[in-house]
Each structure stands twice: as C-alpha cells, then as structure tokens.
Image (cartoon, helix red, strand yellow):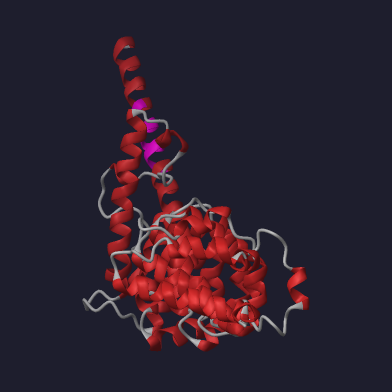
Amino acid sequence: MGYARKVGWVTAGLVIGAGACYCIYRLTRGRKQNKEKMAEGGPGDVEDAGDCSGARYNDWSDDDDDSNESKSIVWYPPWARIGTEAGTRARARARARATRARRAVQKRASPNSDDTVLSPQELQKVLCLVEMSEKPYILEAALIALGNNAAYAFNRDIIRDLGGLPIVAKILNTRDPIVKEKALIVLNNLSVNAENQRRLKIYMNQVCDDTVTSRLNSSVQLAGLRLLTNMTVTNEYQHILANSISDFFRLFSAGNEETKLQVLKLLLNLAENPAMTRELLGAHVPPSLGSLFNKKEYKEVILKLLSIFENINDNFKWEENEPAQNHFSEGSLFFFLKEFQVCADKVLGIESHHDFQVRVKVGKFVTKLTERMFPKSQE
C-alpha cells in the first residue's frame, strides 16, 4: 500500500503539473493573440475596437497552423545573427512568417477577389496595421500593399484623407532598412500629387539626411533619392535641399551607375530652376568630378551631367553677376566651370567618343561655355 500510495501521489503530481503548465500556456497564448489582434486591426476580445476593427483581420496571428511557429519569435532575434544552428532555424522561421504575412495582407483584406486594389475600408485596416504593429515583417507586408495601391491616382487622395501620410512618415524613424525602404517607396508613390507634396514637404529634410548618410548604393539610399526627385519636379520645394547639394555631388562621384543616374535626375530638376542656379554654383564638388568626363564613363551619365552644366550656364547671367562671383569659394562648381582650360581639356578629351550623340553634346557645351563665360575673349 505504501508503494502504491507513493506512485499514486507521483502520478497525481505529474497530472496536476502538466495541467497547470497547459493552462499557463493557453493563457499566455490567448493574451498574446489578443494583443496582436488588437495591434493589427482586429477587435480581439474587445467588443468595440473603434475604427480599426475589421472582421477580415480578426483571425490574423503569427501562425497559420498549430506547428511550433505559434510560439513567440522575435523577428531576427539577437542570437539569430551569431551564426549558430539555433540562429539559422530562427531566421528560417522568421522568413517563413514574413512570407505568410505578405500573402495574408491581400488575402485577408480582400478574400473574395484577386484584385490588388483595396477599398477605402480595406486601406484603413492596412493603415491600422502600419500604425499599431511593431513587427517588421508585418510592417513590410502592409507597406508593400500600401505602395501598390498608392500607384493608382485615385488612391493617393484616399490614403491622404485617411491620415496615411503621417502614419507612413513615422516609419522613417525605424532602424530596419527593409521597412524604411518600403516606407520611402510608399511616400514616393504618394508624392505624385500636388496636395500630398504640400503635406510631405515637412519630411524632406529628414529624408535628405537619411539619404546622404545611408550606406552607399543601398536600397534605402536609392529610394530616398527617388522620393526627393519626385518632390523637386516642381520649383516650389527645391529650396529645402539647397544646403545638401554638395552632398549630392559627393554621392554622384562615389556611387555606382544607378546611384549616379538617380542623383543626376535630382540635380537636373534643380538646374532647370533659375532660382537654384547660385546654390548649384556655390556647391562644393569633389576634385574627381572632372575625371568623369572620360571614355569609360557611361553615355547616359555624361549626357545628363552635360545637360545640368548647360542649364546652369544658361540660367546664370555671367556679366550681370560678376560682383557676386567673388562670393564663391574655391572647390565650388563655379570654379570648376570657370577654370575653362582645365574643364575644356577634360571635355575635349572625349570628343573622340564612339557615340555620335556624346560628341555633339560635348561640342555644344564647350561652345556655350566659351560664349557665355568669356564673351570678351572673342573680341
């Protein structure tokens, strides 16, 4: 009896312990799911969740099945970067969850349609995800959905009216480069709208700072340059970038072909505005700028750079602004252009370029530069 009683007590203890552990697990999981549903637009266990409620998101959670992925896993946790076996498994699970999240944003927002265009109500739910979720893979999926919908003109007004501009702009403060890139893409698509540009101008300095300090040739840097290029299509907000022109020339000299072309598009917008001519001429340019005029440089890069110089040369009244020329410092674009012999040698060095269009553009630039900068030398 004594032995049987001991076995009975041990068995009862194991059963009670297992039951307690199970209850704690269910309670913890229930709270976790309720919190995530609230954060992702669903009502959870609350009857009234306000404007962010939506039945199509009520069953959103990290797991689509009952596998081990239902456990709480932080997106790329610290140990996932060490290179251990556990870290490899954690990264694999995180990638799988991100893939499910991307699919779920469209499926749950519009389950009965394959159309990627969301209704205002569905856009509101996605904006709630962006505003309330802190998980990068959910933010990435939601921002992709917003970016795709912001490509349609009628949705740009809707997203603005729903308060989407400050919600997306707030994501620019994140340290996650993937999420930041997606936020910049959304803002870039939304900026093709006059009213949206008026409201987005307050973020231009932040975008500019992030762009010039980002890793060279990175996706974040390119996305920032595209947004700034869109914001400078008109002359209204170009003055905000006046103090960053030297940084753009630095990126142009150091970047790869894609970065160079994107910087040139931005600078070309500025060069077409006569009011920005002095800021461009006063910008500091790297000494390596002249070396870009060589046969090895890409044709499109040379043509766009010459177009910028031509616009600056056309917009600046050299004789009328002769007193102001003393205010330009050495190393500026003004001195680069004024040192005609050096500049001409650089340019004339590619007159034997194999492309006919490049040769014509070079000849046109040299002729204009001679006539406008040194008219007295022709007498």
Let me know if residue 316 is in the magenta part. Answer: no
Instruction: Give the camera-side residue of 153 and 273.
Output: 273
Q: Residue at x 31, y 36 (%)?
A: 89
Q: Does residue 216 appear in this view?
A: yes
- Can you give x and y, in whole percent of width and height, for residue 318 in the image? 67, 80
- Say if 293 sits above or below 156 in the image: above
Question: Would you say 86 lies left or right of 225 here?
Answer: left
Q: Which region of the structure is painted magenta?
A: 14-23
* Residue found 28% across the figure and 64% down from its top: 354
- Residue 180 in view (yes/no): no
Q: Quadrant of residue 199?
A: bottom right
Q: Residue at x 36, y 83 (%)?
A: 152
Picture quadrant where residue 147 is located: bottom left
Image coordinates of residue 349 in percent, x first then y, are 42, 60
Name the foreground residue: 280 vs 50. 280
Picture coordinates of residue 310 (x, y %)? 51, 78
The answer to which quarter of the image holds residue 304 is bottom left
**What is the count of numbered marks?**
0
Q: Nearer the viewer, residue 361 or 303?
A: 361
Give percent across and percent down for residue 360.
Answer: 37, 76
Whether residue 143 sits left or right of residue 290 in the image: it is left
Quadrant of image for the C terminus: bottom right
Looking at the rendered image, the quarter that the N terminus falls into is top left
Name the outermost residue toward the top.
2
**Secondary structure mainly formed by the magenta segment:** helix
Q: Residue at x 33, y 59 (%)?
A: 101
- Looking at the image, which is closer to me, 167 or 42? 167
Q: Residue furthest front?
A: 379
